[in-house]
Amino acid sequence: MERVLSSELAAHAGEEVLLQGWLHRQRRLANVSFLVLRDRAGLAQVVLSEPVELLPETVLEVRGRVVTEPQLELHDAAVTVLSAPVEPPPVELYRPEPKETLPFRLDHAPVALRHPAVRDRFALAAKAVHAFREALDGLGFVEIQTPKLVGAATEGGANVFRIDYFERDAYLAQSPQLYKQVMVGALERVYEIGPAFRAEPHETARHLSEFTSLDAELGFIRDQRDVMAVVEQCALAMLAAVGQPASGPIPIVQFRDVRSGEEPDLAPEDERRICEEHGELVFVEGFPTAKRAFYTHPGPEPEWSTGFDLLYRGLEIVSGSQRLHRYEDYVAALESRGLDPASFEGYLEAFRFGMPPHGGFALGLPRFMGQVLGLHNLRETTLFPRDRNRLTP
Amino acid sequence: MERVLSSELAAHAGEEVLLQGWLHRQRRLANVSFLVLRDRAGLAQVVLSEPVELLPETVLEVRGRVVTEPQLELHDAAVTVLSAPVEPPPVELYRPEPKETLPFRLDHAPVALRHPAVRDRFALAAKAVHAFREALDGLGFVEIQTPKLVGAATEGGANVFRIDYFERDAYLAQSPQLYKQVMVGALERVYEIGPAFRAEPHETARHLSEFTSLDAELGFIRDQRDVMAVVEQCALAMLAAVGQPASGPIPIVQFRDVRSGEEPDLAPEDERRICEEHGELVFVEGFPTAKRAFYTHPGPEPEWSTGFDLLYRGLEIVSGSQRLHRYEDYVAALESRGLDPASFEGYLEAFRFGMPPHGGFALGLPRFMGQVLGLHNLRETTLFPRDRNRLTP
């Protein structure tokens, strides 16, 4: 008999079916006993005439008849154990929301991630990622994979991990920034979904050593507004995919108009205030050139850049800009920041041989999902988070 | 005027259009001058009455009238330079195939990757990856991202990269194997597309320090044949996507029947011979348990495992198996191989609390694309390859 999923039961009313899954919960009354089976699609209630004595998380096969009145259940069920746990699980998976502390759940992630409300976050994240790809595929972008092992700590020296690489040092890429720009020269429109690594010395709700970054870059733009149009398409598609639809056009405000006093950047309370005043989704444009990365193209007034952020529910979820595209502008930008153009040799080669006006953006997946789900610790939206103090499981 | 792509010219016969791209080639005759413009979609020929003196790879905007007879060209063209190279490029991009040596092209990858035949390999790889995802999405798999920073060098000690991780050591994951198995407990069917890291001491055509691995794992299987059915669906979908359609069912041969003499593994010449005898795609099943990883489930005769390989055109492109799923089997398997169960604590926790029979497989993207394209050095199908001696560009 072919297995059916818990979500397919209603379509099999009156039939004999085979379910497979985990013993999620059991209840014993005077004359009858129930068990709730969990599979990848959800939960199913099974009525047993004889109680079974099994540990939670026992892997089961249940054959029975589907009854829909007064409720959807399996009757006349025969239970077979496929795989037995060694002991009861350390977390209570049957509660509507996990009740254990976050550190405890992270220590026991291999079993705590089975909680239906928790695992569903990651199935939802997969839908967001799918929507991102679909939006960009539709715009002629090509998905690429660029190296995470790099020869120089080029993008902000301090927060980089060093690796023993045979007889020398290598580093872990903090982002695919330099490579995705180079690839604009070959494919014009590229995106990458992959890990980014930051040696964050702080252990806060917002910092992780490794996270999934969604990056895109496109050539032949007029200015950053062409990039923002792509960001808008991606963000609206992703929000629709996770059941939080929003509609465009997303308002655009100028950094100079929304900052606090003369501050050169936005503080968390500024981001919250801007969303309260302008909407759930807001683009902030024109950050100070001096506060953005060296590759950021200045705007028409050079002290204000083409750099923009997209805020969602009071937090920056996307950062982007038009980039410099002329070789001599790179050399000048690196030198003015005290960086040595020689250590950017491979990157700069792309610009020596003709690069179009281009720009791009990056979105951190755990942060995006945190805002969608109202979970403000990135460890809640990362399967196996890594920070200064956590490397396992 | 909105830009059109070179591939769209025929649809604009007689119209005035705007093209943007790179100066791919130019030719000057007595009374007329031609330039070939390269954009992400291909090449376009432009006829000029006045010759232009521009370096190859100059980024251009060309306005002109589309003529289709005697050939598709742009006439009455006006050329604007968007971005000028500093000097002529070190590689000849206009040749039908790159003529420079591979090491030279790798040294100059930021510009050598612009060669149409080279960049097209990576656009084709993106189609293969898309087909893999689409096949698995259709089967209820969820895409996940698991950590590349790991606390112990669990999977084969020697070939692992060590990282300075704050005050201690971390390692780069050699595969998502242990994590994808753990996630079967939460989501049943998962896949991941991400980097895998191997400190390969050899510099051969087949070894890289970093490559894109396509991994999948599924629960509630009967045996490895359920995994092989998923492999077949993925492989046929990927081959169709790259224009090399093949049809199933893929023949399955037994390792014992096709090995050379009493050899415990297949040599490259065995893989070639097996494909010559059995077809372009062949599953080899039942590798010796002792030669496969500790998590491999033995077959009905315990010295022969459930491990299988998929060969394509004489080379293994997929490796997979049913896995062990009982906690006690893991403890026994680790101990019998002299591995310490304590260093697998997080991984083993999944098996302490009920794991279904499951299995999975992995496919290396550069190797797959190498077989598709007939390119037998993985450096030809990797954007920025990494090996013992190469960390840049």
Image (cartoon, coloured by chain):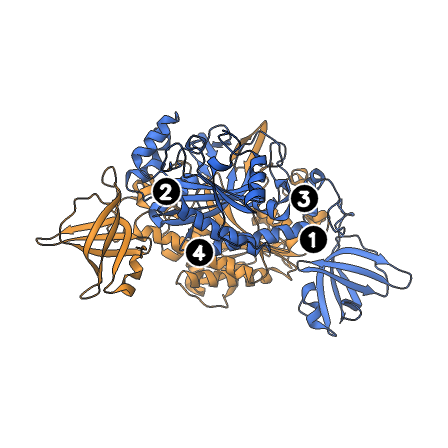
Chain colours: A orange, B blue
Earlier along the polypeptide chain: callout 3 or callout 2?
3
Earlier along the polypeptide chain: callout 4 or callout 2?
4
Relative vertical location of residue A367 with respect to residue A247 in this rendering, above or below: above
Q: Quadrant of the N terminus of chain A?
A: bottom left
**Camera-side mark, 4 or 2:** 4
The residue labelled by disc 1 is B116
Q: Is residue A33 left or right of residue A142?
A: left
Instruction: Give me the C-alpha separation between circle 4 and circle 2.
Output: 19 Å
SS of the residue at dot 1?
helix
Instruction: Give me the C-alpha separation between circle 1 and circle 3.
Output: 13 Å
Q: Is residue A105 left or right of residue A178?
A: left
**Decide: marks 3, 2 in contact (CB < 8 A)?**
no
Between B211 and A228, the residue placed more toward the observer is B211
Earlier along the polypeptide chain: callout 1 or callout 4?
1
The residue labelled by disc 2 is B182
Could you tell me the amino acid type at mark 1?
A: Pro
In the rendered image, which quarter is residue B140 located in?
bottom left
Could you tell me the amino acid type at mark 2?
A: Val
Crowd tier of the residue under label 2, counting other residues whose Cα lies within 10 Å: few below 14, some 14–19, many 20 or above: many
The residue labelled by disc 3 is B109
Labels 2 and 1 positioned on one and the same chain: yes
**Decide: marks 1, 4 in contact (CB < 8 A)?**
no
Tell me the subunit letter for badge 4: B
Instruction: Give me the C-alpha separation between circle 3 and circle 4.
Output: 34 Å
Q: Is residue A262 visible?
A: no
The residue labelled by disc 4 is B137
Residue at the bottom extreme, as displayed: B14
Relative vertical location of residue B208 with respect to residue B339 in this rendering, above or below: below
Labels 1 and 3 positioned on one and the same chain: yes
